[in-house]
Image (spheres, rainbow, N blue to C red):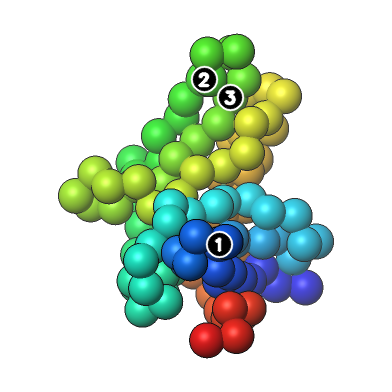
Amino acid sequence: MAGKFEITKSKSGKFLFNLKAGNGQIILTSQMYETLASATQGIQSCKTNSALDDRFERNLSSAEQPYFTLKAGNGQVIGRSEMYSSVAARDNGIVSVKTNAPSADIKDLTGA
């Protein structure tokens, strides 16, 4: 089963997307967007930038939990991972984004 992007709408009326792996696990969550079109553009940026390893920023939270962000060429954060239990698990998450994002289908769940 291939990965997919799911676009949803928050209670505040903003849009966001999640990249899910083939097993349904969320591997990347976007920032909030004002419009559906902006969220769709964010997905295209995710597809493009996920192929470039230097666009992944590997971080540790204040609680020392590893996570990553994916950034566009201009440095803007496209999406962020969950908190992982280890650096190895975080690195596997990055591999999953690289594998799933480029060819993932887009599913609009907003009803817009």
Q: Is residue 27 above or below residue 7?
A: above
Q: CA distance from mark 1 to mark 2?
A: 27 Å
Q: For numbered disc 2, what is the local secondary structure?
A: strand
Q: CA distance from mark 2 to mark 3?
A: 4 Å
Q: Nearer the viewer, residue 52 or 107?
A: 107
Instruction: Decide if residue 46 is on the left or right side of residue 9.
Output: left
Q: For numbered disc 3, what is the local secondary structure?
A: strand
Task: Give the residue at x 50% y 44%.
Answer: 80
Q: Is residue 5 visible?
A: no
Q: How many marks?
A: 3
Task: Give the residue at x 36% y 57%.
Answer: 49
Q: Is residue 53 above or below residue 61?
A: below
Residue 10: which disc? 1
Q: Where is residue 26 drawn, in percent x and y?
A: 68, 54
Q: Where is residue 58 drawn, in percent x and y?
A: 46, 30
Name the residue type under label 1: Ser
Residue 60: which disc? 2
Q: Which comes sooner in the sequence, label 1 or label 2?
A: 1
Q: Which comes sooner in the sequence, label 1 or label 3?
A: 1
Residue 38: which disc? none
Q: CA distance from mark 1 to mark 3?
A: 26 Å
Name the residue type under label 3: Pro
**Which residue bears the numbered disc 3?**
66
Task: Give the residue at x 37% y 73%.
Answer: 35
**Residue that extends furthest to the bottom in the rendered view of this protein:** 112
Instruction: Decide if residue 47 is on the left or right side of residue 67.
Output: left
Label 2 close to label 3 by CB (< 8 Å)? yes
Q: Is residue 18 above or below residue 1?
A: above
Q: Nearer the viewer, mark 1 or mark 3?
A: 1
Task: Give the residue at x 75% y 55%.
Answer: 25
Label 1 close to label 2 by CB (< 8 Å)? no
